[in-house]
Amino acid sequence: MAAIKTTYLLLVFLPYAFASFFEIQYPNVLVTAETGGNLTVEAGPQGGNVIMKPTGNGTVYIGTTDMLKLFEIVNSMPPVWESKAVHGSLGTFLGGVSISLNLEAVDPEGGSLKYEKVSGALPPGVHLNKLTGQISGTAPDVDATYQFGIRVTDKHGKYADQIFSIDTREKNQCLSNPCSHGGSCVDDIDSFVCTCQPPYGGKTCATNCENQAFGVDQGSKKIPDARMSAHYSYGDHPASDGRLNAPQGWIGQNTASWLQVDLGDVMDVHAVATQGYTSSTYYTSEYQLLYSSDGNTFVSTKNGTGNMVYTGSTNVNTVTKHVLTTPLHARFIRFKPVTFSSHPGMRVEVYGCQINSNP
């Protein structure tokens, strides 16, 4: 390593016209001036050149500044967005349709780019890939315009901003006529609601609610024991024994007794069925049906002149089923004995469908 210390050092490189030059060839050459001094590298007066020529991965530093890197940054150009539609619109999409768009920008130096949303909002359910510039997702089922700003940045930190927009349009969910058996359709956001004609129900009115049990039956037990209750039970015969096809059955004390089923939510109740107790001694030959939405206020079903009375079972296993003239909107169904043998014994099931407007 060579070091030249001087207050003012002048290295003069004469042009080739004078047939002389100065050359130092070492792996590293350090030329320094004393504190406060100057270092001047100057070509000769006849138009000579001063050339700094690092090779391989070498570079030229002034202080701690990489001069070649600095020149590269200064001379580089910011990214350029490719031309888009008027006002940056990326298109109009129908609700539920998949969105896949590629934002296109180029780096004049051919380097990699990164994308970032800097303003506005993308449609819900739609996302930006920061490495590729791809916008993807599912269009929301609403009439809306979403405007957002995207910044594309190169490896030098130079960037370009662009405003884009995506329009979405609500899809009429009833166009496909999803409601069967004469049901009417109401369009909803990203969905539809069917108003069904009895006895049909379910999402598309495809279910015969008169035959769809809520699951009190012993073989199903979709209704748990905790949602069965009774008033004035007789002996060791709790409400949870009052399931259709259960080994024994619920037994009450008298006409003040009742057996109740909690459906868990307000439902459309279309039919009920009963059996007697497994012994012919206890059976309910007639009963009333009461219902409630909140468990506090109960109303009896009517027959036009008064409270409706339903016929029950007079033997062990025969199932007596009644289809209701008008479906009930109820959560709680209460079976109240009217006439019976010895004590009112019952095993029950409730039939119906979920109300479509329920969440």
Image (spheres, rainbow, N blue to C red):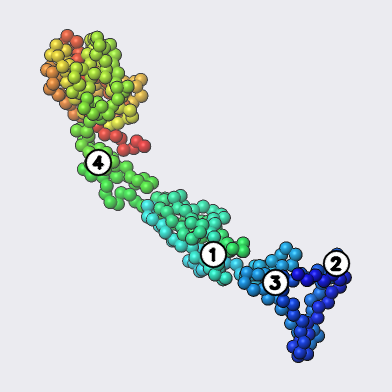
Q: Which residue is mark 2?
A: 34
Cα distance in 3D space between marks 4 and 3: 87 Å
Mark earlier in primary sequence (4, 3): 3
Q: Nearer the viewer, mark 4 or mark 3?
A: 3
Q: Nearer the viewer, residue 231 or 296?
A: 231
Query: Amino acid under label 4?
Result: Cys
Label 1 secondary element: loop
Cα distance in 3D space between marks 4 and 2: 96 Å
Q: Nearer the viewer, mark 4 or mark 2?
A: 2
Q: Nearer the viewer, residue 131 or 126?
A: 131
Label 3 secondary element: loop
Q: Which residue is mark 1?
A: 112
Query: Amino acid under label 3?
Result: Pro
Mark earlier in primary sequence (2, 3): 3
Cα distance in 3D space between marks 1 and 2: 44 Å
Which quadrant of the view contains residue 341? top left
Mark earlier in primary sequence (1, 3): 3
Marks 3 and 2: in contact by CB < 8 Å?
Answer: no
Find residue 90 and report its horizontal and vertical position in percent: 46, 61
Q: Which residue is mark 4?
A: 205
Find residue 335 and report its horizontal and vertical position in percent: 24, 19
Q: Residue at x 24, y 18 (%)?
A: 241
Mark earlier in primary sequence (1, 4): 1
Marks 2 and 4: in contact by CB < 8 Å?
Answer: no
Find residue 258 and report its horizontal and vertical position in percent: 26, 16
Q: Nearer the viewer, residue 101 or 193?
A: 101
